[in-house]
Image (spheres, rainbow, N blue to C red):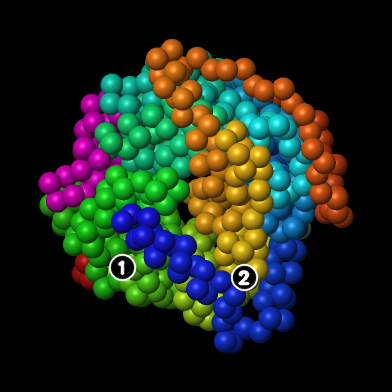
Amino acid sequence: MLMKYLCTAFFCVFLIVNHATGKEFTEHDMAHYRERIKSMFYHAYNSYLENAYPYDELRPLTCDGQDTWGSFSLTLIDALDTLLILGNKTEFQRVVSVLQENINFDSDVNASVFETNIRVVGGLLSAHLLSKKAGMELEVGWPCSGPLLRMAEEAARKLLPAFQTPTGMPYGTVNLLRGVNPTETPVTCTAGVGTFILEFSTLSRLTGDPVFEKVARKALRELWKTRSDIGLVGNHIDVISSKWVAQDAGIGAGVDSYFEYLVKGAILLQDEELHSMFLEYDKAIRNYTKYDDWYFWVQMHKGTVSMPVFQSLEAFWPGLQSLIGDLDSAMKTFLNYYTVWKQFGGLPEFYSIPQGYTVDKREGYPLRPELIESAMYLYRATADPTLLQLGRDVVESIEKISRVDCGFATVKDVRDHKLDNRMESFFLAETVKYLYLLFDPDNFLHNDGSHFDTVSGPHGDCVLGAGGYVFNTEAHPLDPAALHCCSQARAERWEIVEILSGEREPPKSQTSSTGEPHEQTERIVLQDRKKRKMPVLSCPSQPFSSKLSILGQVFSTENT
């Protein structure tokens, strides 16, 4: 039943409109915007390489770099699969070599468990699974082995100490060398607990070590137990006591990717439990938070409105609705969000729905991808030209407002379009990628199953690359077929590993096969990496109490 439902909601809907284009956009228009988006990517990418590498991110106004999420050369990892999606196999191959030579996870760095998982583990897993498509030399046993897979596994193992809590829900921050700091706060956001099942299950199915999927599932199940009597979860939780610290329920910052991973985990793993969990949440969200196709924040136990605001991170929701086949509701909500974009040329972080304007101190637009992500999903499902119009508006706005000599800068204030000195790695990982896929109906990621690769797996030939890719929350695509290819061979080992408390077999010997021909690339030479210390960073969102304290104007207005 689950397979049939998800096929209807995801795969089959996508296949029906695979080659549809909007009536107002000709093939020439589509090609024009693809080239514009490629140009945007290389302007940002080369600016990062020239001015910021080996730091995590580019500072585009001062043309230098900064470390933000763990000193991993994060933009390079995050941009890797985008290179291939744009057709640049040669640069993909070169960057893989650079990462293998320079990335070191044995460092005295405090890293966000959430961000390291979605950006580093997710990025490396995606690149590993796309290695054949990129013409990489493959070792015997791929996709169940390979250097990028081992790097992803190494990074994920550094995160495992965070899950050693009485509840199994992870701490927000871990030191890559020493584990969890004894003084680490037990309070983390909901998304920081429930956003691991895609990457960790993929790791377990590919490597044969069940520990990753086991801890991710335990965290999900413990979080599920904490929902209120009316079926909602809050924003921040104590992972030691399972007590809610912030009891505001919604679909935005601090919660968003938890719901996303229930849906996508159900699709990737064909998992009835995850599917049922989301449907229960979806029912409660509709009953208590939805108002005229907007979604408010409410008190998780009473359902009373606590914040009548739209957050830009919520713009992923219409895309998620499309994956479960709820297209009518998805389009109505998308059009609400699109009106906000048209008002400012970008989505402010917070938007007061009663006032129809920005919220004080939350006027910025850091070039987030969520609205574009929803447009991409909905266009695959409906072929509505309005979605291409959004893509066009985004390209024009970002080029006009954010483009500077050294990349693209965050918009500090959407009201006057002042800029901030940051270009987050998700601009290349997500924003540009979703834009390009919106205008590229024939991209290999939109494969309808008519094209595929075969590889010799442990139990015979496996079919890979036939479509149905599932994007993690950082837009890193995962091929579900690879999980099935490897997990069959690993089944007996899983039982043994459980008995032997996690002992692993050594990696297989490495041999190579001939890859595809190289092609021209657009890049510059990388500089030598230098070591540096990192500040403590945890959840990707402020504590909810901090947000509430600056939102007084929302509550004091006569319109609320």
Query: Considering depth in this image, is 438 or 445 the residue closer to the camera?
Result: 445
**150 sits to left or right of 481:** right
Q: Are marks 2 and 1 in contact (CB under 8 Å)?
A: no
Q: Residues within 10 Å of mark 2 (few under 14, many from 20)?
A: some
Q: Is residue 225 magenta?
A: yes
Residue 349 lies in what quarter of the image? bottom left
Query: Considering depth in this image, is 228 or 427 the residue closer to the camera?
Result: 228
Q: Tell me which label, 2 or 1, sits earlier in the chain.
A: 1
Q: Is residue 202 magenta?
A: no
Q: CA distance from mark 2 to mark 1?
A: 30 Å
Q: Quadrant of the C terminus?
A: bottom left
Q: Position of residue 480 (x, y in %)?
A: 51, 48
Tally of numbered discs: 2
Q: Which residues are magenta?
A: 224-249
Residue at 76% over, 42% down = 136
Q: Quadrant of the N terminus?
A: bottom left
State the residue lying farthest toward the front: 460
Q: Predominant secondary structure in magenta?
A: loop
Residue 204 visible, this angle: yes
Q: Residues within 10 Å of mark 1 (few under 14, many from 20)?
A: some
* Amino acid on which the number 1 mark rests in the picture: Trp
Q: Which numbered disc covers residue 294?
A: 1
Placement of 542 over or under 7, stated as above or below? above
Residue 402 visible, this angle: no
Residue at 50% over, 73% down = 16
What kind of element bears circle 2? loop
Residue at 67% over, 76% down = 30
What kind of element bears circle 1? strand
**466 sits to left or right of 257:** right
Marks 2, 1: nearer the viewer = 2
The residue tagged 2 is 441
Query: Considering depth in this image, is 301 or 33 the residue closer to the camera?
Result: 33
